[in-house]
Amino acid sequence: MKALSTDQIEDVLIRNGVGVLGLVRDGHPYTIPMSFGYDGDEMTFPMQWGTGYGGRKERCVASNTNASFTVYEQDPDQPQLWRSVVMTGTLYEIDADRTERAFASLAANAEFAPDLGVWGIPFDQVDLRLFGLSIDECTGREFSLRHRREGG
């Protein structure tokens, strides 16, 4: 296993547009797959309020903005090679004056756009909010199954 450089971490984030967001409420973890935008400076998450799972995501964010986010990939050219990036920080709602930039990062980077009709709720009844992650710590690792088998 080896640490990724800052440039390698950025490459992983740019190549991938979906990861796992970890939230916590009352000491209980809640992890969800989340599409994201990344523009080199800011992580952007589109969150639909008032849909699915009884508002668990909203309750988590309202009670504790601490979060972690993990992105991982398997190299398509070298299937035995895996990379992961793990970030911890604080979620914040993106201000109205920065939404254009946030939507642009989602359009450029996200694996899938938020499907506002996925829960069968009319578009005008869905509250879509954009959140960013103020990153306190970010680490990246590369792991090769071949090295493990060879003892290295």
Image: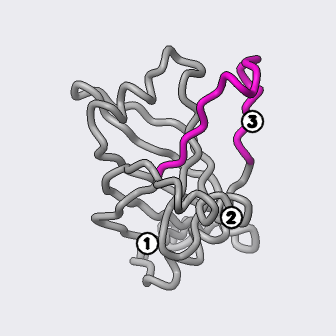
* Image: magenta residue range: 113-131
Sequence-wise first label, 1 or 3? 3
Horizontal and vertical percent position of residue 51? 59, 22
User: Circle 2: is it few (<14), some (14-19), or many (20+) Cα within 10 Å?
Assistant: some
The amino acid on which the numbered mark 3 sits, given as a three-letter code, is Asp
Looking at the image, how many numbered discs can be counted on the residues? 3
Front residue of 68/1: it is 68
Q: Is residue 137 above or below residue 48?
A: below
Q: Are marks 1 and 2 in contact (CB under 8 Å)?
A: no
Front residue of 113/3: it is 113
Q: Residue at coordinates 72% horizontally, 53% vertically from top-left?
A: 111
The amino acid on which the numbered mark 2 sits, given as a three-letter code, is Ala
Q: Is residue 35 above or below residue 137?
A: above
Horizontal and vertical percent position of residue 121? 72, 18
Front residue of 113/70: it is 113
Q: Nearer the viewer, mark 2 or mark 3?
A: 2
User: Residue 17 appears in which quarter of the rendering?
Assistant: bottom right
Front residue of 32/37: it is 37
Location of the C terminus by quadrant is bottom left
Identify the residue at the far front of this view. Answer: 97
Q: Nearer the viewer, mark 1 or mark 2?
A: 2
Q: Nearer the viewer, mark 1 or mark 3?
A: 3
Q: Residue at coordinates 39% horizontally, 77% vertically from top-left?
A: 3
Residue 7 seen in this snapshot: yes
Q: Can you tell which mark lies on residue 104?
A: 2
Q: Secondary structure at mark 3?
A: loop
Residue 115 included in the magenta stretch of the image: yes
The residue labelled by disc 3 is: 115
Q: Residue at coordinates 47% horizontally, 53% vertically from top-left?
A: 94
Sequence-wise first label, 2 or 3? 2
